């Protein structure tokens, strides 16, 4: 869809301030004519008529009045355009952030977050110039020159004609040059966006770069990126400025031609001095809005390029959200089994499906362990269960009713999730834990800390629970982060429990201590657990073995041992290495 | 002021370019004034009905000024923008150079969202220090001087009036807008920083936000920050509009005042009508360079703030630095750790408390113990990310602080629990460890690390933080990196904690194979295949509580045996 049309659509939604801005700007332009008129009268009076200052005072006062009014109208026009722009920016920002929210983790994982934030924060900002300057300027570039030509024509039709003929040159040149400039502006915007992502990546990975003694080498990469940016930008600017050069020349040469023309006609008595001065004073103001359109066009183009990325996000296919809300109570999740029926999923751009016609049943209130080599599709299965992604084919049901007819928030409300790499927010440790239950009592919090073995860890922190967690919880080890996630799960107390290697970063001492609390957590809950350690798996009510997106085996520990295959191999291997 | 001086020092190399651009900028505005003046001269002269030849000078003048203005403007813009981008590139490099020695010890407290904000925004705003801060006052000053001479030729009184109005426009209005917009730029920057952090939390923690029903609240927080920012930006825009309007008003005021002063002089013959016309038009044109001045003040405030923030980060002293004349990394690399102690800044307890051990070349040792025992601190000290509080680590008899840290790190290969992958291709991520490795070597390393199926995917992109890869795959990339690094010393810091049983044993086998003949320090809490180690150190609360080979430790009734038993209880099915 046409970008300009979409941007204009947004404008239409907030049209009132823009209309006020245009009216006020138009009035300001009219005041300009009054100023030129009174000024030319004053000078004409003093110069040609030799009138004294006393008699010219009323005219000077008139000039002052016009000046004051023009400033006031101009200011009002400016603020109204800004008000409208702010409304649009706010709206767009809200839509954009909400869309990213709905698209979910699968989408944000697939793009660099630096790029996303450039689009969200800078991209919307770049539209400011488009709405507050470029759009109003289009109107003024038409209105003001027409107004001036109309007032000049009756007195000096020749100058009027010259202005009228030179004016179309400006938009003509602009269109000619603008086409290639806009393509380049777009390219430049992309370069900038990429650079921002690249920098975040380099900064976050700086310790890694140092480990491989590559951090010094990175310097030249940054230098190259900077040079590349400069070249790209300068290429754009050379052309963008060429357009303003042309516009400038049309303006200055137009003024020169008119000045010479009216000079000659003055000598031929075809004009009075007052008329000539009136025309001369107005001539620069005739070209000014056209010239400004040139610079504002450039600023506006940046916004248009940025908006492509904005619309690209807004146009992402949204996951289907259950419209017919199936009522979901705690009981039904706790009591009903979950079925996967011929579920397939293929990642965009992947040749192999991550899951292929998987049919499994997760019994209610029981413990299901999922095992398989890495890359087998375990995480995909969990993501589908969490509804971070929708099955490509097949269906997941809660005893017959598809989970996709359940509102997403309601579904998520019933799940406790302990991911392998829990995300810790830029907030205090306490806030991070209380995510599970913001209104938890101090006793509940204490209990959760107790069960997850976090008490000692928190005691060692100078600020305790009020410690700020850094970027990605950089001050917490993986094991500690997982325990925070476990504490969240304890507090949330939801009927469906999803554990994605909950203790992969925990040492056995602690794991043993955590195991009994985890047992407690799993009691009576439908639990899905991915684990590598067999001691965690063996007590499961059902073990599903997944390989290359397919279910290869299922059963209890003893059944699988007896059957042979991946599980018993893994088990024996582990036994061997331990004995 | 100090910040500004430091910033100015950074752009000093471009002084002559900047001077040239400013001069051309002045000539551009001068041409504009000249164009209007000569135009006025033509019509005023013509009104007096002189012979045709009298207009020749004026006609040549308008033609020249008309063309010069356009051409000069083009040149000025190209030069000043080129300077701007050169400054930008220099600032980035300067920032990187300064921040590189600080990582990671001194950057622990900075959130990277915040850091990104600082780099991209602060540096981006500083790039304009020339075009927005240094150039406009210079041009205005030169134009003011020009007008002083032009008007002064006709009437000193008129020249004084113009000077007064120029001062009002050049100093009065900027001061007024500064007063009005006090703290606005700073506020906007703060909102932006807050938003950046919130945005990062959204993008990376969206799963948690959804699961805990916090998404709406988080989006609301982002919206609140956005409206806060927009409110301030609106205030800014209104002040901008105000100063534009006020400068215009001053221009008209100057015209009125000059007319007021000069018209009575016409009757006395001091000033003629031509001069009156020319001066009035010149005064009108001379206010153009004063328009950007209030913006200059605002940018100055923003730049100062940005500069302060950058210097705040960069003025930290690096935790470790390279010695002036580093020793070559020794061929004989016996590792000797002596009474090593370490306390993290802000922490009450010692992470390591006077530990000593020795590793002979080719020896394999393991450091085990519960989490929080200080095991990973040892890695940080070996890699010289931190300096020991007390005691020393030496290799081949030399304290490691005597080596070039890069040289040291090249000779110690590390696989840690968290592997950072860059948003790059698999190839680039591997090449980090072996910049000159051929594709063949990369593929061999991948295969050996258990990623045989990746050999055809060298050009595949790993996604944000390598998130397109599973935990196991990421860890195996790290192992492939080690294979490429070919260092004599290896440290495995919980390297296989993320792998499933089958893969773990495969990878462990690979690691055993490649560690043959190398010095190996394994840091782990999982007691697997412990018989292979020449020595095992058991760490608890920063101290070595036991050491010996597996069988010795098992014979003792200590922490090691307790840990081992905990991990190897086989429940009766």
Image (cartoon, coloured by chain):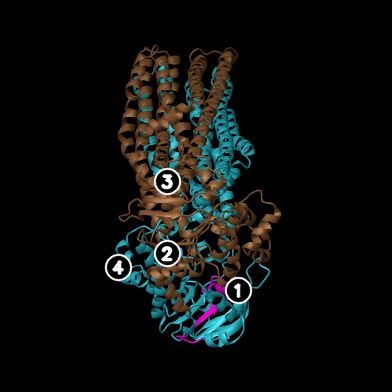
Chain colours: A brown, B cyan
Element carrying mark 3: helix
Residue under numbered circle 4: B439
Q: Are marks 3 and 4 in contact (CB under 8 Å)?
A: no
Boundaries of the magenta span: B359-388
* First in sequence: mark 2 vs mark 1: 1
Instruction: Locate residue A361, reporting x and y percent.
Output: 43, 54
Structural distance between the alpha carbons of marks 2 and 3: 43 Å
Query: Is B171 included in the stretch rendered in magenta?
Result: no
| Residue appearing at x 47%, y 52% in the figure | B15
Q: Do the residues labelled 2 and 3 touch (CB within 8 Å)?
A: no
* First in sequence: mark 1 vs mark 3: 3
Quick check: do tags 2 and 1 share a chain?
A: yes
Subunit that carries the residue with mark 1: B
Subunit that carries the residue with mark 2: B
Instruction: Locate residue B253, reporting x and y percent.
Output: 58, 25
Residue under numbered circle 3: B81
Structural distance between the alpha carbons of marks 2 and 4: 19 Å
In the rendered view, does A565 fall on the left or right side of B495?
Answer: left
Residue under numbered circle 2: B474
Structural distance between the alpha carbons of marks 3 and 4: 42 Å
Residue B373 disc label = 1
Q: Nearer the viewer, mark 2 or mark 4?
A: 2
Q: Is residue A467 visible?
A: yes
* First in sequence: mark 3 vs mark 4: 3
Element carrying mark 4: helix
Subunit that carries the residue with mark 4: B
Compared to A241, does B535 lie above or below? below
Compared to B309, does A457 lie above or below? below
Q: Is residue B126 visible?
A: no
Subunit that carries the residue with mark 3: B
Q: Nearer the viewer, mark 1 or mark 3?
A: 1
Structural distance between the alpha carbons of marks 1 and 4: 41 Å
């Amino acid at each position: 869809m046409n970008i300009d049309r979409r941007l204009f659509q947004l404008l239409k939604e907030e049209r009132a301030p823009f209309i006020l801005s245009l009216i006020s700007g138009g009035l300001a332009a009219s005041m300009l004519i009054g100023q030129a008129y009174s000024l030319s009268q004053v000078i004409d009076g003093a110069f040609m008529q030799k009138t004294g200052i006393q008699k010219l005072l009323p005219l000077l006062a008139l000039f002052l009045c016009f000046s004051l009014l023009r400033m006031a109208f101009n200011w009002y026009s400016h603020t109204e355009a800004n008000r409208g722009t702010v409304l649009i920016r706010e709206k767009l920002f809200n839509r954009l952030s909400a869309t990213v929210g709905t698209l979910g983790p699968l989408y944000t994982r697939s793009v660099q977050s630096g790029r996303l934030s450039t689009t969200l924060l800078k991209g919307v900002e770049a539209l400011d110039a488009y709405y507050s300057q470029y759009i109003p300027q289009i109107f003024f570039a038409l209105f003001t020159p027409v107004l001036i030509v109309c007032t000049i024509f009756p007195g000096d039709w020749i100058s009027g004609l010259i202005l009228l003929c030179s004016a179309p040159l400006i938009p003509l040149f602009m269109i000619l040059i603008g086409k290639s400039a806009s393509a380049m502006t777009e390219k430049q915007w992309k370069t900038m966006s990429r650079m921002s992502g690249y920098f975040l990546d380099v900064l976050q990975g700086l310790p890694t770069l140092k480990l491989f003694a590559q951090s010094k080498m990175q310097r030249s990469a940054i230098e190259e990126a900077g040079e590349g940016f400069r070249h790209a930008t300068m290429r754009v600017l050379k052309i963008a400025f060429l357009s303003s050069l042309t516009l400038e020349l049309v303006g200055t040469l137009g003024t020169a031609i008119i000045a010479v023309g009216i000079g000659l006609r003055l000598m031929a008595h075809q004009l009075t001095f007052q008329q000539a001065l009136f025309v001369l004073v107005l001539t620069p103001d005739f070209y000014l809005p056209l010239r400004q359109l040139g610079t504002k066009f450039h600023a506006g183009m940046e916004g248009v390029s940025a908006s492509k990325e904005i619309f690209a996000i807004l146009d992402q296919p949204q996951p289907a959200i259950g419209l017919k809300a199936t009522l979901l109570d705690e009981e039904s999740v706790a009591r009903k089994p979950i079925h996967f029926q011929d579920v397939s999923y293929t990642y965009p751009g992947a040749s192999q499906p991550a899951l292929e016609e998987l049919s499994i049943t997760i019994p209610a209130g029981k413990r299901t362990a999922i095992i398989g080599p890495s890359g087998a599709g375990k995480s995909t299965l969990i993501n589908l269960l969490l509804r971070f992604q929708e099955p490509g084919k097949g269906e997941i049901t809660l005893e017959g009713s598809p989970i996709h007819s359940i509102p997403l928030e309601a579904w998520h409300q019933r799940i406790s999730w302990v991911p392998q790499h829990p995300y810790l927010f830029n907030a205090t440790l306490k806030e991070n834990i209380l995510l599970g239950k913001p209104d938890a009592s101090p006793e509940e919090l204490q209990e959760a800390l107790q069960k997850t073995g976090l008490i000692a860890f928190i005691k060692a922190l100078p600020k305790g629970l009020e410690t700020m967690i850094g970027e990605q919880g950089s001050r917490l080890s993986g094991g500690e982060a997982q325990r925070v996630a476990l504490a969240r799960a304890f507090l949330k107390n939801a009927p469906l429990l999803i554990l994605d290697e909950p203790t992969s970063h925990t040492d056995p001492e602690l794991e043993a201590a955590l195991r009994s609390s985890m047992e407690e957590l799993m009691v009576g809950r439908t639990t899905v657990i991915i684990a590598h350690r067999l001691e965690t798996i063996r007590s499961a009510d059902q073990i599903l073995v997944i390989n290359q997106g397919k279910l290869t085996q299922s059963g209890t520990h003893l059944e699988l041992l007896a059957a042979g295959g991946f599980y018993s191999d893994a088990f024996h291997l582990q036994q061997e290495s331990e004995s | 002021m100090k910040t500004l001086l430091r910033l100015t020092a950074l752009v000093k190399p471009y002084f002559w370019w900047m001077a040239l651009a400013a001069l051309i900028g002045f000539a551009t505005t001068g041409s504009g004034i000249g164009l209007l003046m000569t135009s006025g001269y033509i019509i005023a002269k013509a009104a007096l009905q002189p012979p045709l030849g009298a207009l020749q000078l004026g006609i040549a003048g308008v033609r020249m000024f008309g063309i010069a203005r356009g051409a000069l403007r083009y040149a000025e813009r190209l030069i000043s923008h080129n300077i701007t981008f050169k400054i930008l590139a220099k600032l980035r490099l300067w920032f990187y150079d300064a921040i590189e020695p600080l990582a990671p010890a001194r950057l622990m407290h900075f959130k990277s969202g915040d850091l990104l904000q600082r780099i991209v925004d602060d540096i981006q705003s500083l790039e304009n220090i020339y075009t927005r801060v240094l150039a406009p006052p210079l041009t205005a000053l030169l134009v003011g001087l020009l007008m002083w001479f032009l008007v002064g030729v006709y009437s000193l009184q008129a020249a004084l009036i113009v000077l007064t109005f120029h001062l009002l426009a050049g100093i009065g209005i900027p001061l007024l807008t500064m007063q009005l917009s006090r703290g606005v730029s700073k506020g906007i920057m703060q909102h932006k920083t807050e938003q950046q952090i919130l945005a990062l939390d959204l993008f990376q923690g969206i799963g948690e936000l959804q699961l805990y029903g916090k998404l709406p609240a988080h989006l609301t927080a982002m919206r609140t920050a956005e409206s806060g920012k927009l409110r301030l930006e609106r205030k800014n825009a209104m002040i901008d509009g105000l100063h534009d309007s006020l400068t215009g008003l001053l221009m008209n005021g100057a015209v009125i005042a000059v007319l007021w002063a000069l018209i009575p002089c016409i009757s006395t013959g001091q000033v003629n009508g031509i001069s009156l016309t020319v001066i009035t038009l010149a005064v009108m044109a001379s206010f153009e360079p004063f328009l950007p001045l209030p913006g200059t003040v605002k940018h100055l405030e923003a730049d100062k703030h940005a500069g302060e923030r950058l210097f705040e980060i960069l003025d930290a002293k690096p935790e470790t630095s390279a010695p002036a004349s580093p020793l070559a990394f020794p061929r004989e690399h016996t590792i000797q750790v002596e009474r090593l102690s370490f306390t993290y800044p802000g922490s009450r307890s010692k992470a390591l408390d006077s530990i000593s051990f020795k590793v002979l070349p080719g020896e394999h040792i393991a450091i085990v113990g519960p989490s929080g025992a200080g095991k990973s601190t040892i890695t940080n000290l070996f890699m010289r990310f931190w300096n020991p509080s007390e005691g020393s680590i030496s290799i081949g008899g030399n304290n490691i602080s005597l080596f070039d840290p890069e040289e040291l790190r090249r000779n110690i290969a590390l696989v840690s629990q968290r592997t950072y992958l860059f948003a790059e291709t698999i190839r680039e991520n591997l090449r980090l460890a072996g910049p000159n490795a051929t594709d063949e070597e990369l593929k061999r390393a991948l295969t050996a690390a258990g990623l045989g199926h990746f050999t055809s995917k060298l050009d595949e992109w790993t996604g944000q933080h390598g998130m397109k890869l599973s935990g196991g795959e990421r860890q195996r990339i790290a192992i492939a990196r080690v294979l490429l690094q070919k260092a004599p010393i290896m440290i495995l810091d919980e390297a296989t904690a993320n792998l499933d049983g089958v893969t773990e044993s495969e990878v462990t086998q690979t690691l055993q194979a490649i560690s043959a003949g190398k010095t190996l320090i394994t840091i782990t809490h999982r007691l697997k295949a412990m018989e292979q180690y020449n020595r095992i150190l058991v760490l608890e609360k920063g101290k070595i509580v036991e050491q010996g080979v597996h069988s010795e430790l098992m014979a003792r009734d200590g922490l090691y045996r307790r840990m081992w038993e905990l991990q190897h209880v086989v429940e009766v099915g």
